[in-house]
Amino acid sequence: MLIHSASQLVTLAGGPRRGADMNRLEIIADGAMLMEAGRIAAVGESAALLARYPRAERLDARGRVVMPGLVDPHTHLVWAGDRAAEFEMRLQGKSYMEIMAAGGGIAATVRATRQASRDELLAQTRQRARRMLAHGTTTVEAKTGYGLDLASELAQLEVLLALDEEGPLEIAPTFMGAHAVAPEFNGDAQAFTDHICAVMLPAVRDWWQQNAAARALPFVDVFSEKGVFDLEQTRQILLAARALGFPLKLHVDEFENIGAASLAAELGAVSADHLVKTSPRDIEALARSDTVAVSLPCTPFGLGQHEYTPAQQIIAAGGMLALATDLNPGPAWCENMQFVLALACRAMRLTPAEALCAATINAAAAVRRDGLVGSLEAGKQADALVLQSGDFRDLAYRFGVNQVQTVIKKGEVVYNAPII
Ligand SMILES: N=CN[C@@H](CCC(=O)O)C(=O)O
Ligand SMILES: [Zn+2]
């Protein structure tokens, strides 16, 4: 299929970007793209491609933007139930960490998720996955972490693999047994840390080899935060995971700085995520490393906070910045990366081009799939969007409605918005 007559074919060609280079989108005016067998076969100007491939089936973009499918590199996609009551408690002044310490928060979702049948969990998760796809996300990272015992964590991984198999949304899974201290451990974070290292991580690897041997191992992630897993416990879990071959991710600096962003850089984590209380020293450490800095602006927004990731400093230092929803049943139930772009430009002063780069090729780097998705280049997977407008900046400028017209996954149209 040949998509042609795009006002702007936003290619993002040339790999992940650092610093000021994030503004370089590599746009082809009046652009076109040929897709064959799920891959991108050619990218160029409409006149040239229409002349070169006269017999290809055509999709006329009619002067609208064509861009890579969005990549959401940080979500807690798989859970059961909701926490609307906690939303009201927070509005009345209770903090996220207070609710968590009182047995709510993550623990409340752990109870609901453990009680749900596999089919129920699959059905609730599928709905969210479909909503994400309809809003232009074609690849998503998704974490376990609402099971906290081996059987329920594996059940979450199973749901993620089943949904990935179903498609069309592609899922990069993460094992996050270290999301909170399991209730069976009565708040003893050290005992649970030891258990994760000695029992859970080796069991997850064995399970993976038996059930998903053809796939790369999932990421391992830890909620590194005062009152959850401290810096030494985080290091212990990450070293055990790395020794077993798992690639690493980390939740850092969401509420307090305990030095975890520098640890992520030191241990070669693929990404360090949240980054609200991040110090200049941590920013330097990230910028000197290959660890992608993933900002999750929906979380401070959802908590009614006014402090966001120091994105300008990360960019100025030459860091690789990505954006994600952090989709979860607590502070950030948001399936829509377009809203993340709009928020990032306002709260962190990103340019629309930087935000777009952070949500595509840099986000792909945060899930180690930048060789496959995140840009429109010959040889890559044909994951693309046709927007409803002719200017890519509208994706950040306008907000609150879905601006995606058509979603293409592996060369197939998988979603079409009604024409209005
Ligand atoms: N901070 C830890 N985990 C999630 C929130 C999960 C929840 O509240 O259920 C996050 O990234 O924001
Ligand atoms: Zn998270």
Image: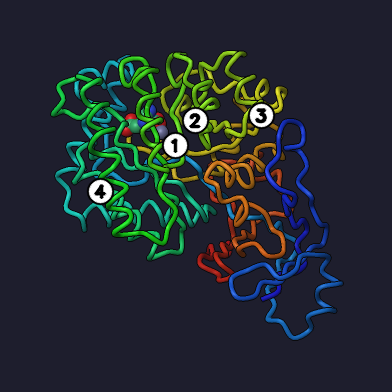
Label 3, secondary structure: give it: loop
Label at residue 319: 3
Within the displayed image, which quadrant is ligand 2 positioned in?
Answer: top left
Give whichever of 202, 399 is nearer the camera: 202
Q: CA distance from mark 3 to mark 4?
A: 34 Å
Q: Secondary structure at mark 1?
A: loop
As measured in the structure, the alpha-carbon distance from the residue carrying label 1 to the one carrying label 4 is 21 Å
Q: Earlier in the sequence, mark 3 or mark 4?
A: 4
Image quarter in which the C terminus is found: bottom right
Q: In the picture shown, does residue 21 fall above or below 360? A: above
The answer to which image quadrant residue 362 occupies is: top right
Residue holding disc 4: 154
Percent x, y for residue 229?
33, 21
Sequence-wise, the earlier of marks 2 and 1 is 2
Q: Which numbered tag is attached to residue 273?
A: 2
Looking at marks 1 and 4 on the same chain, the residue that comes earlier in the sequence is marked by 4
State yes or no: Cβ of the residue under disc 1 lies below 8 Å from any atom of ligand 2: yes
For the residue marked with disc 2, what is the amino acid? Asp
Q: First in sequence: mark 1 or mark 3?
A: 3
Say which residue appears at 60% left-offset and 38% top-offset.
341
Mark 2: secondary structure: strand
Tell me the amino acid under the disc marked 3: Gly
Report crowding for label 3: few under 14, some 14 to 19, many 20 or more residues within 10 A (C-alpha). Answer: many
Choose top left, top right, bottom left or bottom right for residue 387: bottom right
